[in-house]
Amino acid sequence: MMECEGIAGIEQFSSPGKGRGLRVSRAYEVGELLFSCPAYSYVLSVNERGFICEQCFTRKKGLAKCGKCKKAFYCNVNCQKKNWPMHKLECHAMCVYGENWCPSETVRLVARIIARLRHQRERSPSEKLLLLRDMEGHMEDMDNEKREMNEAHIAGLHHFYSKHLDFPDHQALLTLLSQVHCNGFTVEDEELSSLGLAIFPDIALLNHSCCPNVIVTYRGINAEVRAVQKISPGQEIYTSYIDLLYLTEDRIERLRDIYYFSCDCKECTTKSMDMEKMKVRKLSDEISQKEIRDMVCYARNAMEDFRRLLEMCELSIDKMSTVFDDANIYILHMMYQAMGICLFMENYDGAVRYGEKVMKPYTVLYPAYSLNIASMYLKMGRLYMALDRKSTGISALQKALAIMEVVHGKDHTYVTELKQEIRGE
């Protein structure tokens, strides 16, 4: 029997209509840390290897590589030794398979969870409130496409990890994969770039709201929950599972598809921001509802197709601009993608041009303490500095800093490094 340790100031309760949830037993101010949770298991993205330590997720130069596979990198010998129980699952296989070693991040994470579960005898620091095995999985709600994906993941597990792992039975694997699907977290840096995948059982107890009062950020391999609104004793704490820029209809569709529920928060009930997000141009001829619906369909389809093509972005923006205002969320999505393509092509002037069009609407449409706003100020600030627009760049970085001090905490490495960047150190 693994006894529940609990977290000071936080209690689990039965949330009406939502199942399990978390609420506070004391008041919290904006920016205050409610609790932190170390990852139960985690995996660094292959794309980040060589830049970030596999064990502690510290980004630094001069990392030491694994002497055998030459593909895993660490801060020092201590990090390497700590990571060996997990890295040994992959080290030999990477040498044997070479370029053909290609398990998905989900498969890699599940393999590590299985390895840890095999040796676990007591409740981990990640499970003060909820055991990993008790996480919700919604396996009965999965459609055929997701079931087929889980079978493909199981095939990947057997193909790449059978030498070092004893697997539970097929049904147990399906259950674990469904739990990871519903509760896995993408660990992101200060610019919202993906660093890897992790599982945080206690964080999984947080219910969703499109009007969140907390935000989850990362400090290495630890997730931190901080208040972005004042929270009163007895109040439930909510985070957002999805990007809040989307319209109510789109948010609800994403929540149903991934998490199998519909949101009934104040924003989803009133749709108070949808009109702001769906601004149309003021033309001499009134735009009909059918024209708006048709343009929404076009925008949704275009968003799926244009990801890598700047020319298609520009054509799409031009077409939608005949109906939609520049602050319309579909145009904002297109402009954000165009900005990313410009950055990839090292067209920094183009990136700034699109970024400036995105920035002001973001500050209206997102909550005040949003990682999306902070990451945009960071990107813009660094772009301005690269283009020798120092005063404008520092101003943007300072705006990013003001948000980051709340969502990451004033002592976070990201905050310290940004202060140094602003000072020119």
Image: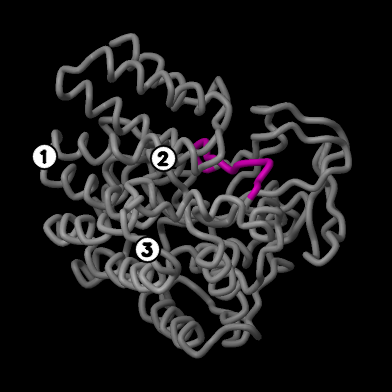
- Marks 2 and 1 sit apart, C-alpha to C-alpha, by 23 Å
Asked which secondary structure carries label 1, the reply is loop
Q: Quadrant of residue 10?
A: top right
Residue holding disc 1:
347
**Placement of 399 over or under 73, stated as above or below:** above
305 or 112, which lies in front? 305
Residue holding disc 2:
361
Asked whether, in this view, residue 95 is left or right of residue 103, the answer is left
Q: Is residue 219 covered in magenta?
A: yes
Q: Quadrant of residue 399?
A: top left
Q: As shown in the figure, which amino acid type bears the numbered disc 1?
A: Asn
- Marks 3 and 2 sit apart, C-alpha to C-alpha, by 22 Å
Q: Which residues are magenta?
A: 211-221
- Marks 1 and 3 sit apart, C-alpha to C-alpha, by 35 Å
Q: Residue at x 40, y 64 (%)?
A: 105
Task: Name the quadrant of the C terminus.
Answer: top left
Residue holding disc 3:
287
Q: Residue at x 57, y 80 (%)?
A: 173
Q: Position of residue 176 (x, y in %)?
A: 60, 74
79 or 325, which lies in front? 325
Q: As shown in the figure, which amino acid type bears the numbered disc 3?
A: Ile
Q: Residue at x 78, y 56 (%)?
A: 21
324 or 91, which lies in front? 324
Q: Position of residue 111 (x, y in %)?
A: 49, 68
